[in-house]
Image (cartoon, rainbow, N blue to C red):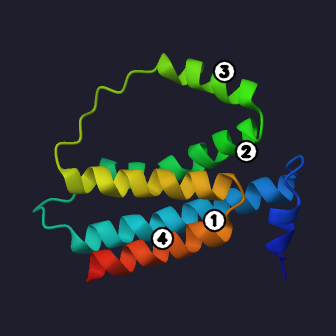
Amino acid sequence: MFDFSSLTNNLEGSSLTNVIVIALVSFVLSSLIALIYQKTSRELESPKYFIQALILISIPVATVMQAIGDSLARGLGMLGALAIIRFRTTLRNPRNMVFMFTSISVGIAAGVYGITIAVIGTIGFCLVVLL
């Protein structure tokens, strides 16, 4: 059985196992968020690309957070590099923005080895949405 506490204790250097586990945790939690979005959406036709984006966005965010680590210089460099990218897609529905932000938050939490926070936050968010 995999010991999740080893992730929080081993913040120095990411092993291949840690990277894979973080990517899987991000994928599973963001898939849960996408499933809840799909089940509770009132739109007549569910936007398949948006649902795919909800699932996929948390994995690169977690990867970026692992790459940055505790380095301020890497964080500022990444900020500068990502500032070049302009996202032309607008989310007109505030509910869609909340779901996208939640999926990004899961990736951030998992990327900094906060798996417990990511899991509890996702479950709490999904329960509130269902209510």
Residues at marks 3 and 2, CA–CA distance in whole angstroms:
14 Å
Neighbor class of circle 4 (other Cα within 10 Å; few <14, some 14-19, many 20+) is many
Front disc: 4 or 1:
4
Residue lying furthest left in this view?
44
Q: Nearer the viewer, residue 123 or 44?
A: 123
Q: Nearer the viewer, residue 109 or 39?
A: 109
Residue lying furthest front in this view?
72
What type is the residue that disc 3 sits on?
Gly
What type is the residue that disc 1 sits on?
Val
Residue 62 located left or right of residue 37:
right
Measured from the top left, where is residue 84 in percent x and y? 48, 16
Position of the C terminus, as image quadrant, is bottom left
Label pair 3/2, CB-CB below 8 angstroms: no
Q: Identify the residue shown where x is 58% and y is 19%.
A: 81
What residue is pinned by disc 2?
A: 66
What residue is pinned by disc 3?
A: 77
Q: Quick one: SS at disc 2?
A: helix
Q: Identify the residue shown where x is 89% and y is 49%.
A: 12
Quadrant location of residue 24? bottom right
Q: Earlier in the sequence, mark 1 or mark 3?
A: 1
Q: Quick one: SS at disc 4?
A: helix
Q: Quick one: SS at disc 1?
A: helix
Q: Which mark is residue 25?
A: 1
